[in-house]
Image: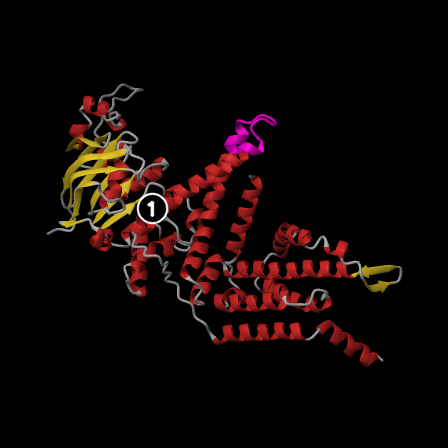
Amino acid sequence: MSHHTISVRGLSFAYPDGTQALDGVSFEIGHGEAIAVVGANGAGKSTLLLHLNGLLTPVQGTVDIGGIPVAKDTLPDIRRTVGMVFQDPDDQLFMPTVAEDVGFGPLNLGLPPEVVGARVAQALARVGAEHLAERPPYRLSGGEKRAVAIATVLAMEPSILVMDEPSSGLDPQARRRLLGLLEGFEHTRIIATHDLDLAAQLCERTIVMGAGRVLADRPTADVFRDDELLAAGGLERPLGMLACPVCGAGTPPAGA
Amino acid sequence: MSSVATGLSALDRLDRLARLESPVHRVDPRAKVITTGVYIVCVVSHGKYDLLGLLPFAIFPVVLATEGGLPLGFLGRLLLVVSPFALIMGAFNPLFDREIVAQFGPWSVTGGWVSYASIVLRFLLTAGAALVLTATTGFTGICLALEKLKVPDVLVTQLLLLFRYIFVLGDEAGRMGQARRLRSFGRRGMGWRIYGQMLGQLLLRAFARAQRIYLAMKSRGFDGRVRVAQRLHFRTADLVFTLAWSAAFVVFRLVDVPLEVGRLVTGLSG
């Protein structure tokens, strides 16, 4: 049984104030797949992500990670398997220095200090942030914060990466670097995003959500050509798939 | 709100000073925390009218600041910024305590003025030592020392997170203040009522952020204890630092050094 699969069945969730955030969501994700979760604001994307490592408990339905149901007694295993990168890096980087922050997860896994040191160095090198190790997180730029936030998760060596809006607030070059980084990962990836060009470039498959339901679960290229579906999801075609507004040239290939 | 920004940038600079290299910076954080603790106890336990006896204590912050290569002007300005607290605390002493304790020609000095001066001096000494401690050890170093000295984890975690998020909170407050100023004209929109509502907003935002941070911590296996990998080494030099300074403070506390020196000098000349 692979650790890298996700199976969500009939998942429903309502917040204590009565807001029905998820309503019968089901999908399967296989080993090494990269999936985009798209949809308008308030469609339930973030709520869905919080279920994938047991931060929220379903009102109805189940979530299985690598065949193991997400439940109270499996949480430590699930959280080691599923690495979660939050939308605001300031929420994720809470330790006084970058190195300590990246070491936070591995230390909590009970690894010996030498191993933690190696993991920290490795994770920072992977995102190209070795030189930031001793810096306090609050003085990093947006792009640096994002890279380090990803390193904090990589250091736990998860099989699955879950990311909420990884490209929000980044300048074009920082976004380009992030894309290159994410493309190089062999983890199973789930990316909730409004950056449809990112989805088009990184993800073979896209789940469109609307009002807590799955509106579509199809190959990405297929989803972004379905204007009716996009409209229903509060979306538009990615810029990379639109004709050039200046020269009027035809549709360039996705992600160009 | 700009005073908030000024305060935070001072805090930031203080923390950056802690990354300098000097013999004082290299002393183990635990040694510095314990020594400063002994120092504070010795200083504040002096008698109400003690003034001269306090003077030798100034050696500790001054020596550490110079040896640590700290900018004295910056530390002095910080001391001034926090001193109104002490100035107000003792301000009524001269009014209530009018007993004359010394006479210098036409000027008589009342007990109230002496005790007031003693309060201010004690404040300057202890606050100065705390600033020097922070500027040579860093907030994180102090937290680490407290953890190793068996201070409860909850407290240390609180301090660590406080230091991390005070900057985020300050930025948020700054942005809110800016947004208000941009849409306030003259007195309209700048009243206390709005101010109160903004503080409420800030509190709610802080709650929401705390919730998100907690989720991020839980995702990475947080179980109520923050583990820090940095290991400290308490060397013989650190022990000597702690014992020598502490012994000096106890001597300063028990023996009125300026008085004894004066006696010695007048004894020799007489």
What colouring does the structure picture have?
Answer: secondary structure
- Where A2 falls versus A215 (above or below)? below
Q: Residue furthest left?
A: A1
**Residue sitting nearer the eye, B71 or A246:** B71
Which quadrant of the structure image shows residue A203? top left
Magenta extent? B178-194
Helix, strand or loop under label 1: helix
Bin the neighbour count of mark 1 within 10 Å (Cα to Cα): few under 14, some 14-19, many 20 and up. Answer: many
Q: How many marks?
A: 1
Q: Could one spot residue B270 in this view of the protein?
A: yes
Residue B169 shown left or right of residue B269 in the figure: left
Q: Which residue is drawn at 51% across and 69% down?
A: B31
For badge 1, the amino acid type reads Ala
Q: Name the residue under label 1.
A: A147
Give me the chain letter of mark 1: A
**Residue sitting nearer the eye, B224 or B261:** B224
**Residue sitting nearer the eye, B213 or A88:** B213
Q: Which residue is drawn at 50% across and 66% down?
A: B26
Asked if the magenta segment contains residue B193, the reply would be yes
Q: Could one spot residue A145 in this view of the protein?
A: no
Which quadrant of the structure image shows residue A20? top left
- Where B192 falls versus A58 (above or below)? above
**Residue sitting nearer the eye, A63 or A237:** A63
Residue A140 shown left or right of residue A27 in the figure: right
Residue A186 location (% of width, % of height): 19, 47
Residue A24 location (% of width, % of height): 17, 35
